[in-house]
Image: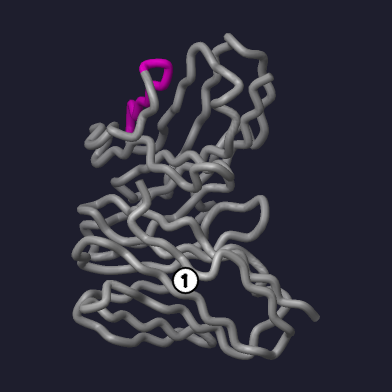
Amino acid sequence: DAGVIQSPRHEVTEMGQEVTLRCKPISGHNSLFWYRQTMMRGLELLIYFNNNVPIDDSGMPEDRFSAKMPNASFSTLKIQPSEPRDSAVYFCASSLPEAGSYEQYFGPGTRLTVT
Amino acid sequence: SQQGEEDPQALSIQEGENATMNCSYKTSINNLQWYRQNSGRGLVHLILIRSNEREKHSGRLRVTLDTSKKSSSLLITASRAADTASYFCATDDGNKLVFGAGTILRVKS
């Protein structure tokens, strides 16, 4: 298994541009999580999906952020327009809680820099 | 907001020594997990301990849980340079996890 796949690994963009981050969860996992990690705020949960349905998006900072999961093998996190304060590492993770396993498997992250 | 708070924030030890990290949390839990994050990488699950367990072992790792004090500890025995990483505790909130701020461990060879 390739694990959780994220792309791109690095993204540098200018303020005001649209940014789309992509995630492919582990095959068979039905829960998917988007996190943001910064030095100041640590690791924050932005949103999570269960069976492709958004369950909790209370961590999404504002309307500039949106996330979708059109099918079980793909999710996107979009920021539009981007701002310098969005600079962070964004992680995607997946799990299969129904199997009694609550551990989450993290992707390598996307390092976003907004100038 | 963070549920778990790790202590210490940073720890520096010599190879071969034991490393102990502590985690305190605020609300009741079903389980508590520990994760490791190497620099520039994603988090990796280390061990899960359920609320009805008091101690659990996995290789050189020993985790304890005291639900009355709402605290957990992670002990790494006979540390190696490769153990250098950040360590996070995470508590469950339904299907979500709430992570602490982490302990940065440096093992000097």
Measured from the top left, where is residue A49 in percent x and y? 29, 38
Report which quarter residue A15 is drawn in. Answer: top right
Q: Is residue A65 magenta?
A: yes
Report which quarter residue B3 is drawn in. Answer: bottom left
Measured from the top left, where is residue B24 in percent x and y? 36, 68
Measured from the top left, where is residue A51 in percent x and y? 24, 40
Q: Is residue A114 left or right of residue A44?
A: right
The residue positioned 25% from the left and 75% from the top of the image is: B50
Q: Is residue B47 left or right of residue A52?
A: right
Pointer 1: what residue? B46
Q: Is residue B20 left or right of residue B64?
A: right
The residue positioned 67% from the left and 33% from the top of the image is: A10
The residue positioned 20% from the left and 53% from the top of the image is: B94
Location of the C terminus of chain B by quadrant is bottom right
Measured from the top left, where is residue B28 in percent x and y? 19, 65
Q: Is residue B9 above or below residue B51?
A: above
Q: Secondary structure at mark 1?
A: strand
Residue stretch rendered in magenta on the structure: A63-71
